[in-house]
Image (tube, rainbow, N blue to C red):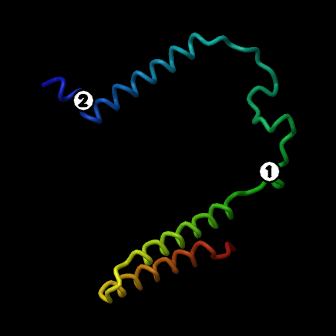
Amino acid sequence: MIQDVLLTPPVAACVFLTLAYGLYWISGRLAPRGPETPGKHLPYACGEDLLPPEAQLAYHAFFQLALMFALLHLATLVVATLPPDGTVHRIALVYLSSIVVSVLVLTKEES
């Protein structure tokens, strides 16, 4: 009875999360403390100074493009694996039109 309850995924996940947090907490207490230096908590950039925020690259456009290509590849896969009879062509047309709307939203210029 109790063994069945302990082996359910939510209870097992809670037990393992508690064990992991306990191990993390104990390790944090046992770890040696280093001296406080001025650059200790600054982000590391391979030994170079970081660029000012206005000169740093933004990956927003890259992720939009990657998502667009993922949508197009998924649409190609779905349409290519449809059966050859004509009953699903209307569903495919609705699916492709929703993909077109998604791509248009992703490629819309921000103002």
Task: Inspect the image, locate mark 1, and give the three-letter code of the amino acid beneath it.
Answer: Pro
Q: Name the outermost residue toward the bottom.
A: 86
Task: Inspect the image, locate mark 2, and give the three-letter code of the amino acid beneath it.
Answer: Leu
The residue under label 1 is 53
Residue under the image location 40 percent in, 74 percent down: 81
Packing grade of label 1 (10 A; few <14, some 14-19, many >=20) is few
- Give the left or right position of residue 24, taking residue 86 as reference: right
- Which residue is at the front of the view, 39 or 12? 12
**Residue 100, numbered circle:** none
Task: Please identify the quadrant where the C terminus is shown.
Answer: bottom right
The x, y position of residue 47, in whole percent, is: 85, 34
Q: Is residue 1 above or below residue 111?
A: above
Residue under the image location 34 percent in, 30 percent down: 14
Residue under the image location 49 percent in, 69 percent down: 74
Q: Name the outermost residue toward the front.
A: 84
Residue under the image location 51 percent in, 79 percent down: 101
**Residue 7, numbered circle:** 2
